[in-house]
Image (cartoon, helix red, strand yellow):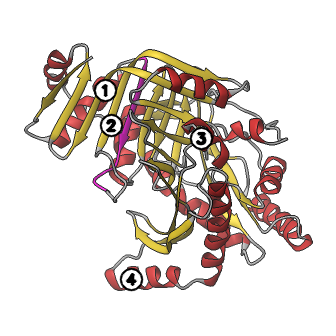
Amino acid sequence: MKTVYHYPENISVFKEKVLQWAASKEVACFLDSNQYSDRYSAFDTLIAADVLHEVDSYKDEGFKKLEFFLSQYNCWIPGFLSYDLKNELEDLRSENPDHLQFPDLFFFVPRHLIIIRGNVVEIQSPDAADLARLIEKEMVRDVPILFKGSVKSRFSKASYIDTVHQIKRHIARGDIYEVNLCQEFYATDAQLDPVTAFRLLNKLSPAPFSVFFKLRKQFIISATPERFLCRRDNKLISQPIKGTSARGGDAETDKHLKDELKNNEKERSENVMIVDLVRNDLTRCAIPGTVEVEELFGIYTFRHVHQMISTVVCQADPSLQNAEIVKRTFPMGSMTGAPKVSAMELIEQYELTKRGVFSGAVGYFAPGGDFDFNVVIRTLLYNEENGYLSFQAGSAITFASDASKEYEECILKAKAIFSILNQSIEC
């Protein structure tokens, strides 16, 4: 593997070119921070393309396979984890329909790796020097989104509201405190240009953990703002999101909505429940006594929403391998509820489709032991082979939940995807 450094005249145009180039390969991963950065950021954009080695799993010892795979290679290894790996961790099942057919887990060692930091492009490839010139020759296609299909919902508004009431009865009985209920929006016999879809979504809803992932005929197109789990040296970081507010049409209204979210007792109670769950998850892979809340109820602003984000950290138990650390904290509490296992049982009972990659994680393992994974929300999933397109949205149901407002929150979270597909749904 050779390394060269490239200095494009226009880094934004270069990113468009490298996305288009990578998407021409059978397997590609494009991770974009959209200029959002924090103390844990490692790069602005990472692009991996073509496969030297890969590992996948379909309902069979996924974490064990991943641990062995990571032991073989000390390099950048991108990939994704499906929510349904939960079945390896607890006595759980996933029996709802699965039309997307993604593997439960997929990671690969890329032939070509490109890392962008500021205006500097690092290219690692057997053909590093030639690759820079090849990418610069790409002609970026400027085409409207090519989507053919009609988006429908698995839930009607009335059936969603009725389901929320049923879940609240479980809460009243003491079965759970909170559960994240998701609904699927989907299209059959759909046709989509995935690259154009990602470009439009990334422009309309730029987010710190955006993803374009191509696994042959299957695509992950994501504008997620949420970090699941990150490792920097021996420090583990989790940043659950619980609490959402729309943006205002003017500065005064926007500030009012932001302050309203910050002081909303329901949203704060939801957030602290998940913070407690994440703290508990991290104790399973931490040096005893090192778990702490670094930030509670932080309010962060994105293109369409304000979000309440907390940060929980710990020092990693040095006896645990990275695959085991991820396993012990997966799936993320923000997408399940509390208590975690009971919430996942009710999710399977009341949701109408298999989650699959949705509410799983996409990210990377880096040479030296660091890693960073997002939470797969605000995400379009597409199986080109069977023409199935899907995106899901959820909200946290507590005893204080207003079912109609929870439905509206789901629609708000899916707003950007509806927009790029030029579709609408009842609200």
The reply to whether dot 3 and dot 2 touch (C-beta < 8 Å) is no
Q: Quadrant of the C terminus?
A: bottom right
Residue 258 image position (x, y, % from top left): 44, 79
Looking at this rendering, what residue extends furthest in the right direction?
A: 173
- Nearer to me, 369 or 305: 369
Q: Is residue 149 visible?
A: no
Give the CA separation, mark 1 to mark 3.
28 Å
Query: Which circle, 1 or 3, is nearer the viewer?
Result: 3
- Magenta stretch in the rendered image: 26-36
Give the CA separation, mark 4 to mark 2.
34 Å
**Residue position marked by numbered label 3 in the rendering:** 320
**Residue position marked by numbered label 4 in the rendering:** 255
Residue 405 image position (x, y, % from top left): 65, 72
In the image, is residue 31 above or below residue 18? below
SS for callout 4: helix
Residue 30 covered by magenta stretch: yes
Residue occupying the point 77% across, 49% down: 351
Give the CA separation, mark 3 to mark 2.
27 Å
- Which of pointers 4 and 2 lies earlier in the amino acid sequence? 2
What amino acid type is highlighted by mark number 2?
Leu
Query: Which circle, 3 or 2, is nearer the viewer?
Result: 3
Q: Is residue 375 visible?
A: yes
- Which of pointers 3 and 2 lies earlier in the amino acid sequence? 2
**Residue position marked by numbered label 1 in the rendering:** 113
